[in-house]
Amino acid sequence: MEQTIFADTIFALSSGTLPSGVAVIRISGPGVKHALVKLCGIVPETWRAELRKIRAADGGIIDSGLVLFFAGPKSFTGEDAAELHVHGGKGVVAAIFGELGGLAGLRQAEAGEFTRRAFLNGKMDLTGAEALADLIASETETQRRFAMANSAGQQGVLYRGWRARILQARAMVEAELDFADEADVGDTASATAWPDMHQLAEEIEAHLASYHRAEIIREGFRVVIVGAPNAGKSSLLNALAARDVAIVTEEPGTTRDLIEVPLDLGGVKVLVTDTAGLRKNAGRVETVGIERARERAAAADLILLLTDLSDPLPITDGFGNVPIWTLGTKADLVRGIPVAAHDHVVSVRDGDGLDRLIGALAATAMEAASVTGVLPSRLRHVELLSRCKALLETALAGGRGLELRAEDLRLAGDALGRIVGTVDVEELLDAIFSNFCIGK
Ligand SMILES: Nc1nc2c(ncn2[C@@H]2O[C@H](COP(=O)(O)OP(=O)(O)OP(=O)(O)O)[C@@H](O)[C@H]2O)c(=O)[nH]1
Ligand SMILES: [Mg+2]
């Protein structure tokens, strides 16, 4: 890809919230060298850190810090770039921003603008840029590994490979069109191109089916706690979260809304939701809460259905196809009394059964988030992959002229090109990069 020349030089704080020990200010664009000379008196050799005084236009010293210069195109953005590592005081950063903003052609960067320039300069494809956003947002080990693999280009390699197969098939179909009269070119497409496109449609379908795994990794494995009022749902949530998130009282009907807590179990993000107790003839507010509980449970990856062993109330609700673990609660109240079979028996009061439950939850979440091969990581990818597959199927269905089928193949290839960003994506860029933080 050719280098895109931007007139503006952009700058931003690329490290976290101030105050901090060190703040990293990143600058990128054609005005970088000029800015370095103005503030630091020199342009350091590329990649070499220099300790310099950083001065205001009036000659006063603002701070001293490390100055790094990255000569384009061997920089993150592909253009001349620099980093100032200064003391992370708000006053320090504000003063440096004031100096930078005062130079002609320099302005503060918008969210994601550095990465956007990196993409436009061919430093990474769109899936790589998205993976970088995921890496920065990662909270768990699984999220980090998943984002890291994608930012290394796994997805891009897969989609470009598929696109190349479609281009190859299209070339054969077009050859058949062009040389239809010549006997030796005759049926080439039907012999190899169409079977391969059939195979590809199946591969895309299998790939699409794995999207939920990516959702679990990025958004979390969703566990919903349900049961009759007073079954001990909020107590269990508090025990899992190891803090008092939900109100617990001996009054049935305490919880009326959904309470969601993110946990890190075995390196996987798990979202545990406490809900209103399920019962008939509840008051108005509680009835709304119960409706929400049912909806959330139906969309869960796993339901924990709680029954108070000391006062079992049957729950007759169904929850679609969601796997259910039954939990007997308040085991301390029924010591010595035989209890009906449950997947787990716990007591929040004395902690019995909790470790086993947490271990089982972690194992199940880890299994659901395990990755073999490449996954589509965003809804955007799923939509374009579905479009590609539908177009391949139209092309394969036949019953239409060869020219139209070749056009279907072209559009199918374009859908894949849009995922990686090689086909007109201008209208997508704002949506994608505005989700980045400033300074990235
Ligand atoms: N002995 C004993 N009491 C428990 C245990 N777990 C919960 N409780 C008590 O049971 C009562 C109800 O607990 P909650 O956690 O509020 O029950 P809930 O299912 O959230 O109830 P609602 O929000 O009203 O649907 C409280 O008085 C708790 O202290 C337990 O393991 N042992
Ligand atoms: Mg409750």
Image (cartoon, rainbow, N blue to C red):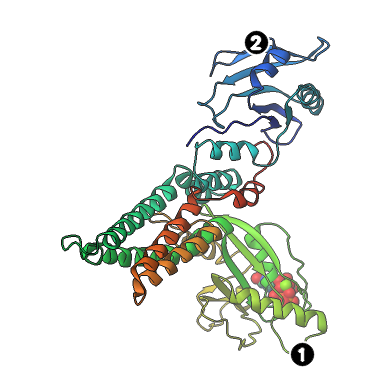
Q: Kindly tell me whether mark 1's CB lies below 8 Å from ligand 1.
A: no
Residue 124 visible, this angle: yes
Q: Which of 201 and 90 lies nearest the eye of the viewer?
A: 201
Query: Around disc 2, counting alpha carbons within 10 Å, would you say few (fewer than 14), some (14 to 19), or many (20 or more)?
Result: some
Position in image of residue 80 (x %, y %): 59, 24
Q: Residue at x 55, y 56 (%)?
A: 218
Q: Is residue 105 above or below residue 204?
A: above
Q: Is residue 419 above or below residue 391?
A: above
Q: Amino acid at mark 1?
A: Asn
Tell me the quadrant of ligand 2.
bottom right
Judged left or right of residue 41, residue 116 is left
Instruction: Give whichever of discs 1 and 2 has the lower sequence position.
Output: 2
Q: In the rendering, which numbered label is found on residue 281?
A: 1
Residue 349 visible, this angle: no
Position in image of residue 435 (x %, y %): 65, 49
Q: Amino acid at mark 2?
A: Ile
Position in image of residue 402 (x %, y %): 33, 68
Q: Which of 217 and 359 lies nearest the eye of the viewer?
A: 217
What is the CA distance from the residue labelled 1 to the residue labelled 2? 77 Å
SS under mark 2: loop
Position in image of residue 86 (x %, y %): 70, 22
Q: Kindly tell me whether mark 2's CB lies below 8 Å from ligand 2.
A: no
Query: Around disc 1, counting alpha carbons within 10 Å, would you say few (fewer than 14), some (14 to 19), or many (20 or more)?
Result: few
- Label 2 sits on residue: 42
Q: Residue at x 65, y 87 (%)?
A: 313
SS under mark 1: loop
